[in-house]
Image (tube, rainbow, N blue to C red):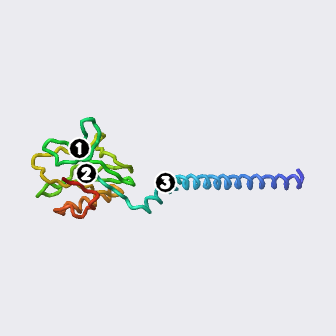
């Protein structure tokens, strides 16, 4: 073999070595690029979620509640009388945002009691409170002469729990907005 052949062979080996290492570097770069793209995709909220967050951050949650009963034809009608013992009443709510709520009642001359701890109410108008996949109702008791019902509302369940713990120390439900409460 001549010196030219040896030099060519050495150059060829050197080029293969460079090509092999540059291939691995390129593949590692492509893999990092793809992984970072997937992570960005997974961690970024969708445009719909961004739009919902923007809307809910600018608007105050509105919540109102009314007492209703079914009439003889099965239609929901606003409660227009003081219910007698044994009658069932339901609660209709309207909200502009999804909320986590608990229903409290305060019979006359008594401490507030929790009727249910936590449900999530979707946004909408005139929705009957649904608890455990059934319309929630309250059966009026003989000693219920004057009863106040209030919804404690929060944007998430952790905040709702904090509010409920703070209310346990209170003897009255005065801190709850009037539109969150109904009575007879």
Dot 3: what SS? helix
Question: At 56% from the left edge and 52% from the top edge, which residue is drawn?
Answer: 38
Q: Mark 2 points at which residue?
A: 117
Quadrant in which residue 161 is drawn = bottom left
Q: Position of residue 28 (x, y in %)?
A: 63, 54
Dot 2: what SS? strand
**Foreground pick, 89 / 77:** 77
Q: How many neighbours does mark 3 have within 10 angstroms: few (below 14), some (14-19), or many (20 or more)?
A: few
Dot 1: what SS? strand
- Horizontally, residue 36 falls left or right of residue 90, namely right
Question: At 12% from the left edge and 56% from the top edge, which residue is drawn?
Answer: 108
The mark nearer the N terminus, 3 or 1, is 3
Tell us which disc is closer to us: 3 or 1. 1
Q: Mark 1 points at which residue?
A: 137
Q: In this view, does 56 lie above or below 85?
A: below
Q: Where is residue 78 in the image (x, y as percent from the top left)?
A: 26, 47
Quadrant in which residue 70 is drawn = top left
Q: How far apart are marks 1 and 2 (CA)?
A: 15 Å
Count the marks: how many?
3
Question: At 74% from the left edge and 54% from the top edge, which residue is drawn?
Answer: 17
Residue 49 - label? 3
Q: How far apart are marks 3 and 1 (CA)?
A: 34 Å
Question: At 14% from the left edge and 44% from the top edge, which residue is drawn?
Answer: 84
- Horizontally, residue 184 falls left or right of residue 10, namely left
Which residue reaches farthest top? 73
Q: How far apart are marks 3 and 2 (CA)?
A: 28 Å
Q: Where is residue 52 in the image (x, y as percent from the top left)?
A: 47, 55
């Amino acid at each position: 073999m001549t010196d030219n052949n040896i030099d060519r062979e050495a150059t060829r080996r050197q080029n293969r070595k460079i090509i092999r290492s540059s291939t691995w570097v390129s593949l590692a770069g492509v893999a990092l690029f793809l992984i970072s793209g997937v992570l960005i995709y997974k961690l970024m909220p969708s445009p719909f979620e961004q739009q919902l967050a923007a809307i809910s951050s600018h608007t105050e949650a509105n919540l109102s509640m009314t007492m209703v009963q079914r009439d003889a034809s099965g239609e929901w009608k606003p409660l227009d009388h003081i219910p007698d013992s044994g009658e069932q009443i339901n609660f209709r709510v309207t909200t502009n945002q999804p909320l986590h709520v608990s229903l409290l009642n305060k019979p006359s001359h008594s401490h507030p009691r929790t009727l249910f701890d936590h449900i999530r109410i979707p946004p909408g108008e005139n929705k009957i409170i649904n608890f455990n996949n059934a319309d929630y109702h309250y059966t009026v008791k003989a000693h219920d002469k004057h009863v106040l019902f209030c919804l404690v509302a929060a944007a998430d369940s952790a905040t709702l729990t904090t509010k409920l713990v703070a209310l346990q120390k209170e003897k009255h439900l005065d801190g709850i907005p009037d539109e969150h409460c109904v009575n007879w």
